[in-house]
Amino acid sequence: MPDSSHGQTHPGGDPPPAEPQGGAGLLDGLPEQGHGAGSSSSSAEGEAPAAEQPPGAPAPSTATRPPASTAPSGEHNVIPLRGVDPHQQGGPDAVPSSGGTHASPSPGDAANTANAANTAHTAGSAASTPEPGHAAPESAEPAPQAPSAYRGDWVAPQGYPAGGLLPEPGPMPAGTASVSPGRMPDPGAASEQGQHAYPEEERRAVYRAIRERRDVRSGFRPDPIPDEVLTRILEAAHRAPSVGLSQPWDFVLLRDREQRERVQHLAHQQRDAFARDLPGARARAFTGLKVEAILDTPVNIAVTVDPTRGGRHTLGRHAQPQTAAYSASLAVQNLWLAARAEGLGIGWVSFFAERDLAQALELPAHLEVVAYLCVGYVNEFPPEPELALGGWAQRRPLSWAVHSEEYGQRGLPGQPPTSLLDETVAVIGPARQPAMTEARERQSRMTKPPGALGVLEDVSVELSGLAGECPPPVPEPAAVAVFAGDHGVHAQGVTHWPQEVTAQMVHNFLAEGAVVNCFARQAGAEVTVVDVGVAGDLPAVPGLLPRKVARGTGDFTTGPAMSVDQARHAVEAGIEVARDLVAAGNRCLLTGDMGIANTTASAALIATFTGRDAAEVTGRGTGVDDPTLQRKVDVVRQGLEVNQPTSREPLRAVAAVGGLEHAALAGFILGAAAQRVPVILDGVIAGAAALVATAIAPEARTACVAGHRSSEPGHAIILEHLELRPLVDLELRLGEGSGALLALPLVQGAIRALRDVATFDAAGVTDKRDTRSPER
């Protein structure tokens, strides 16, 4: 992506520091929908199935156990965990070859090496220490090649190499802190202080197991798992760290088919219930996901936790009783890593009501199920999580998760800390002209008169420029985020509606009883409600994101509505919501809002950023009478006079006269632009937020699509200022995201037409190259 800092205004008024950035959004290059078919039920990662096994793939073995002298069935999937020749026979360092392993270590070493991912060195550990002088092979075993079924469908996301698994770490000088996107840190770059570090080959094996661990759904083989292999991975799990050394886990091994059929029945019940609750595009994608392998694997393992184990005075559990379950999760991870080293695939099934599963397994009442794992040898391990390959979700970059000294101050080790807002603005870039040119050229060759699709042709060209490819991805799944907040200016009598209606409407959204819910069901979109500033308390329920910055704003007729720090926090909350929705697989975002008196704050923002008079930009909002409308105009003028906001300092302007939902919506737009995902704007509140966002980063305009034209007079002024053409003009003034949702099918249709309509050449239709429409 070109450097986006040129021509942008930093939130504080100064241009942000230029820094090199990647050139793509999180969803660049993803497939359009899930692959594969089969019965469903989910997991920790919920990944999509592998495609059908390609010709030439190794056939599943029918032997009950491979002979000790032959290469076992899963040998190409095994990670050698010690630096020995895997084919060496005899001698003190000979490696057992039973159990579908290529170069499996001794049971103690397998446990210790897998456990090293959680703790590299524990004083007093009973684990045996790898021999530091052990000979290493001349070259590490190559990473397993992905089958063509994976390799053909997968396009590497940003930061990942095309064509297979993440690369083995390359040489890196000691002390180097830089880590490329999509790569593990180089385990060979040990500092002098790392005197207890494993030898390089063993470190590489540990990081390789972490890198190549997968949540597997498809391609399991019927080969039984030898008892000694199963014991080794259980021993690795049992060596996990635990609170107070309580080891609160137990492992229930399930081989009986009838028992597993009962468990599968429970999983299918929950799978079906989940499917019924999905919006349209998600529901269609879900039908292609295989999310359990309960009967496809020879062994299932239920991992349980006893939260009372160790007694009342278990060290470390007094203040945090949940650490017992956390400890059991560490055991699951140890088991998973050891299984990968042995060439075993594991699928975590979580489509259960925990108490129903515990009852089906006839567990004692005090035990809880932490994980239900399907374990078996596989034909191949996919190069990336199956969920990512199917486009259901994507990995979040490490930089999103690392904070320096305090939450919200971003920065990887060795890099200068930065704010989320500055980081986001730095990666927003312009439309990519080659893709736009290609889209225009294709429009001219499609079997229709040039320009016959009107504004929809412009939309397809603009979204091609945003995505950097022609045609761009169809903008689905889609999600509307309704940001809610209260306003102190309500005290000036600018509306007849009481302030508590904001919280009441949030409850209505969550109960799926509002217009936004109705339109979202029609359009197949997801609804997420975000509390950034509701004055009252809201319940912790699915569908509500608690991001409250403050309990409403102040009255801007007497001073700033909020502090600049609060405005920044709200903007960054919006960025985070956009990032999370895109990482969850959404390819189109829509703005929604809720806040009694927010049209008054919108009018103040519009006047600030367009220079228009308060009387021109102030409307009736919820339908106020003439005296109340005049009061609104006077209140807007008073707020502008008191605070003197300026468009040159957009963050201070929104803090002075805006609302918390305006700030969050501005961040939402910036977050979408940074990920190069289109954001369909609703009405005047979203438009006012777009003025803030484009003042912070002018190129964020590239991601914006005007869903409709509101009947509020200020909205037409916004659209003129931003040079946006609305897709719908129905005199709407509801908000909530209603107009954006009505426009969503038009945006999707514009891209589908660009992608699917035949060209004159392809269809064998004569191209008259005439700008006139043919006579009907």
Image (cartoon, rainbow, N blue to C red):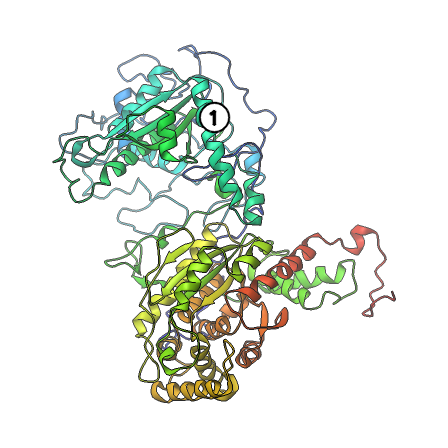
Residue 195 against residue 67 in the figure, above or below: below
Q: Residue furthest right?
A: 775
Left or right placement of residue 551 versus residue 142 in this view = left
Q: Nearer the viewer, residue 550 or 393?
A: 550
Does residue 274 appear to the left or right of 423 in the view shown? right
User: Quarter-wise, where is residue 727 in the image?
Assistant: bottom right
**Foreground residue, 234 or 153?**
234
Residue that extends furthest to the left in the rendered view of this protein: 313
The image quarter containing residue 210 is top left
> Mark 1 = which residue?
378
Residue 3 visible in this rendered orientation of the protein: no
Residue 123: name its quadrant: top left
* Image coords of residue 676 (percent x, y): 51, 60
Tell me the crowding category of disc 1: few under 14, some 14 to 19, or many 20 or more residues within 10 angstroms, Cα based: many
Is 701 positioned to the left or the right of 367 in the image? right
Residue 681 percent location from the top left of the image: 53, 67
**519, above or below 204, in the image:** below
Q: Nearer the viewer, residue 596 or 558?
A: 596
Q: Quadrant of the C terminus?
A: bottom right
Q: Is residue 503 something that shows in the picture? A: yes
Residue 238 image offset from top left, x and y in percent = 25, 27
Name the residue: 29% across, 43% down: 189
